[in-house]
Image: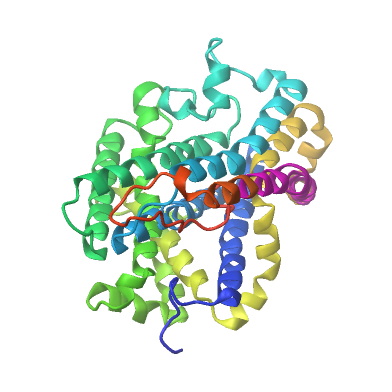
Amino acid sequence: MAEVSTGATVGAADRHARKASLDVVRGLAALCVLLGHVHILDAHSPTAGLGNFVLLFFPLSGFLVAGPFLRSLAAGRALPSVRGYALRRFARILPAYWLVLLAVAVVLPTMWRPEAWWGWPLHFSLMQSLVPDEGNRVLLVAWSLSIEALFYICVPVLAVLAVRRARDRLSPGRVAAAILTFWLLSAVWNAVAFALGPVHSPGVIGAMHFSLLAYLCAFCPGMLIAVAESRGATALGGPWAWYRRLVAHPGLVALCMAVVWIPGLPNVNLNLPVPPAVAANLYLECGSIGSGLALALMLHPPAWLGRATRPLAAFGVISYGVYLWHIVLIELIAKHAHFLVRAGWPVLVPVVLIASVALGTASWVFVEKPAIAWANRRFARTAAAPAQQEVVGHAAAAHLGEPAVETAGTA
């Protein structure tokens, strides 16, 4: 394979193919989470543990959501419009999520279990992971959405702070060093959390495990790849050249991904000769690195892989709705369709999958896609009036490097 294409040089067709290939990662992550949650209905389901692949969502957000800000920092350009960014994140995440919360309140009122009145605004604003024992109290999968929402808030804030503190241009190396520092901070945070107690501990310890700092390690590979794919990094040697050589050999990327993902696979017990807290942290780091390698593979997939994964790419388009609605379906089956529960996982898997695809498709067509179109229209009007944009950075004119609204991460 020739020298890999970079984000700065690919044409329109390459960008379209790249977006479709990232839908494969979204589709795989949503499918694995759905299959893993069938275990809630049938403890003997062989799909138990596949929910660990939820980690695949986070590098996508690191690459797609933080990427435009990181590339602007590394190139010395002004940051993307923070106002437009906030509008697009709002439109991509909240309308479909709010609809699911309202549906839960109507059809499954017993799932609404916030401790007090403040639980309603807490969960509707996706800030529930900030409060101990609230992360998945109403909607089981919303803990990851809350972490994503906090990440979305932190990205422009930290980017603006970086620009204002930098005395000269932030090179790709300096940006990457900052990302690695955040990764190290996340690893230390997780080491402390695992030493204090297991993942599902109640109270503050449990909140530490399901916090942005805990999962920041999973966003970091995507952010590093965003910098490596930037125009400035493609002209550099050292680690940047190593990255280009690696992604030029997809078979090697796939092999590395398979090896580092082994600890995160279901029913795999390596019995590592280290304390359990260290092993648990290591498994999380391996899952994060493996997810980053999956992203790198699908950024530059061989042609045959792109063709073979088209069904997953189509599934990835509706993955956000599937991710939100499948757990509601599982709760409905648990409460009102005991005959399906008695039939076991061979029946439950296709029933939940088919119903989730139907609801996910409806969510995409009637809620998500219109919200995305509305946000893009509003953003286009904002971009047409540069005098009203936030211009923050080294350049005089605003650089709108943010791509069209993506179904990034769990979104």
Residue 86 within the magenta-colored segment of the rendering: no
Between 389 and 263, the residue placed more toward the observer is 389
Q: Position of residue 180 (x, y in %)?
A: 25, 55
Residue 12 vs 372, above or below: the answer is below
Residue 359 within the magenta-colored segment of the rendering: yes
Residue 260 vs 182, above or below: the answer is below
Residue 303 visible in the displayed image? yes
Magenta residues: mostly which secondary structure?
A: helix
Q: Residue at x 45, y 46 (%)?
A: 387
Number of numbered markers = 0
Residue 411 visible in the displayed image? no
What range is drawn magenta here?
Answer: 350-376
Q: Position of residue 260 (x, y in %)?
A: 38, 64
Q: Position of residue 214 (x, y in %)?
A: 35, 40
Q: Is residue 408 left or right of residue 77?
A: right
The image quadrant that residue 59 belongs to is: bottom left
Between 343 and 369, the residue placed more toward the observer is 369
The image quadrant that residue 172 belongs to is: bottom left
Between 318 and 269, the residue placed more toward the observer is 318
Between 317 and 333, the residue placed more toward the observer is 317
Q: Is residue 301 left or right of residue 70?
A: right
Q: Position of residue 61 (x, y in %)?
A: 47, 52
